[in-house]
Image (cartoon, rainbow, N blue to C red):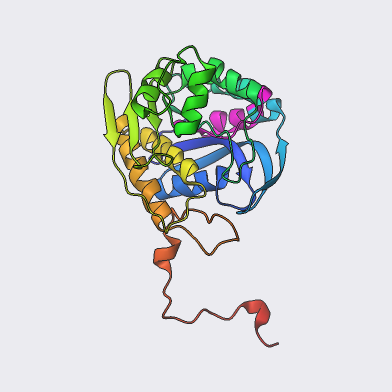
Amino acid sequence: MADRRIPAVLSIAGSDSGGGAGIQADLKAFAHCGVHGMTAITALTAQSTVGVTGVLPVPGDFIVDQVRAVAEDIGVDAVKIGMLGTADIVHAVREALGLLEPGTPVVIDPVMVAESGAVLLDDAARAALVDELLPVASVITPNVPEARVLVGEGAQASADEDDADALARALVALGPDAVVVTGGHRERPTDVFFDGDTLEHIEGERHEDGAAHGSGCTHSSALAAHLALGYTPLDAARKAKAIASEAVRNGLRDIGEGAGPVDVLGLTAARRPAEPPPALWHNRPR
């Protein structure tokens, strides 16, 4: 395989038909970070800014086929894992990771519940995630509620569930090389990074007037992209925090009737409101 100047990063995740989260958010984040994005879709969702109305899981063997196709042709410099849904999909993803070069960075965003409240990871899948995927992860990026659930699934269930530092330490004990407990659900939006040695607080700002749909996907994808670019996990976590925060601040609040998507591509900044919009071609007089 020829050396590439642009790293290639694979998202193993679900599709959001509304374009705000899932692989759609991942690909936008990869583009922002300057890496080539690839996908292995785990599930299709019928989803809007208002909610999830349907989920169609992808058969496990086809998930493996998707990963094999890109690994054999293009190669994979880092992986981001998002929505998994079922234990069968977790098993398939674990098998698929065996197709990658040893040492390929793996970032897991343990997506459990959509912003609308829809459950995206069932009970059996949570247990399988802890047993099969956390031990091979380079970094996991749960928010506080997700961290509490994962700690409860594992052997280290004694952590103070209100203490993000303790949650990060308990999660590292479950096998990943490093943990970022993201701060979106805390009073102060501070991320907690822990890799078994270094515990670091990554400060951020809360943007109450922003739009946050897809922020977790954007954060984990940016982190995976920066690992592929050669950053250390801590430096990648810092970059991801800044990118996701800016994407929330610039969020597209006028898209849809519900929680608007983040804007990692700077679409808001690219607008020039002083200029009248061009006439739509299908509205022009014949």
Residue drawn at the location 35% of the way across and 36% of the way down: 191
> Is 177 rendered above or below residue 225?
above
Asked if one can make out residue 75 in the rendered structure from this viewpoint, the answer is no
Q: Residue furthest top?
A: 155
The number of numbered badges drawn on the structure is 0
> Magenta part of the protein: which range?
64-88
Tell me the quadrant of the picture where the C terminus can be found: bottom right
Judge from the rendering whether residue 226 lies leftward or rightward of residue 69; answer left or right. left
Q: Residue at image x 41%, y 14%?
A: 173
- Asked whether 237 or 4 is in front, the reply is 237
Q: Where is residue 25 drawn, in percent x and y? A: 52, 47
72 w.r.t. 155: above or below: below
Residue 261 seen in this snapshot: yes
Q: Is residue 78 magenta?
A: yes
In the displayed structure image, the side of residue 190 where residue 103 appears, left or right: right
Work out whether 6 lies above or below 263.
above
Residue 94, by quadrant, is top right
Asked whether 117 or 269 is in front, the reply is 117
Q: Nearer the viewer, residue 210 or 31?
A: 210
Q: Position of residue 51 (x, y in %)?
A: 64, 49
**Residue 54, percent from left and from top:** 72, 43
Q: Residue furthest bottom?
A: 285
Q: Is residue 247 magenta?
A: no
Q: Position of residue 114 (x, y in %)?
A: 59, 41
At 51% from the left and 23% from the top, the residue drawn is: 150
